[in-house]
Amino acid sequence: MKRILYCKKDDLFTLKETCPTCGETTITTQPPKYSVDDKYASYRREAKRPARKEAGLL
């Protein structure tokens, strides 16, 4: 099954691995699959902490 891909530079959605207009590689639009046994969740939370503290959310 093909997934929709996105080019950040051109703000364009496509099914191709490279953007048809600029030739940049495209990225997936789906978020990563959720897992209860996520071994990197604590690292992601720690990386977001300074930005959340600056925004007044912590």
Image (cartoon, rainbow, N blue to C red):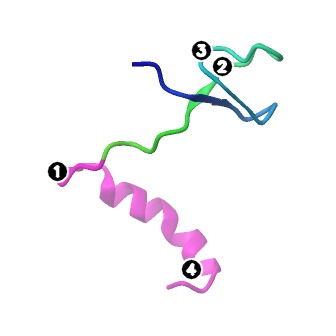
Q: Amino acid at mark 2?
A: Thr
Q: Earlier in the sequence, mark 2 or mark 3?
A: 3
Residue topped by disc 2: 25
Does residue 6 appear left or right of residue 52 in this picture? right
Name the residue at 56% across, 75% down: 52
Label 1 close to label 3 by CB (< 8 Å): no
What is the quadrant of the N terminus in the image? Answer: top left
Residue topped by disc 1: 37
> Of discs 2 and 3, which sits in the foreground?
3
Q: Nearer the viewer, residue 34 or 54?
A: 34
Residue topped by disc 4: 53
Task: Please rate how many residues cluster around mark 2, counting C-alpha atoms within 10 Å: few if below 14, some from 14 to 19, many from 20.
Answer: some
**Percent x, y for residue 33?**
32, 43
Label 2 close to label 3 by CB (< 8 Å): yes
At numbered mark 4, what does the secondary structure look like: helix, strand or loop? helix
Name the residue at 48% across, 60% down: 47
| Span of residues in magenta | 34-58
At numbered mark 3, what does the secondary structure look like: helix, strand or loop? loop
Does residue 9 appear left or right of residue 38 in this picture? right
Task: Please rate how many residues cluster around mark 3, counting C-alpha atoms within 10 Å: few if below 14, some from 14 to 19, many from 20.
Answer: some
> Of discs 3 and 4, which sits in the foreground?
3
* Marks 1 and 3, how far apart at CA: 30 Å
Say if 24 sits above or below 6 in the image. Answer: above
Residue topped by disc 3: 17
At numbered mark 2, what does the secondary structure look like: helix, strand or loop? loop
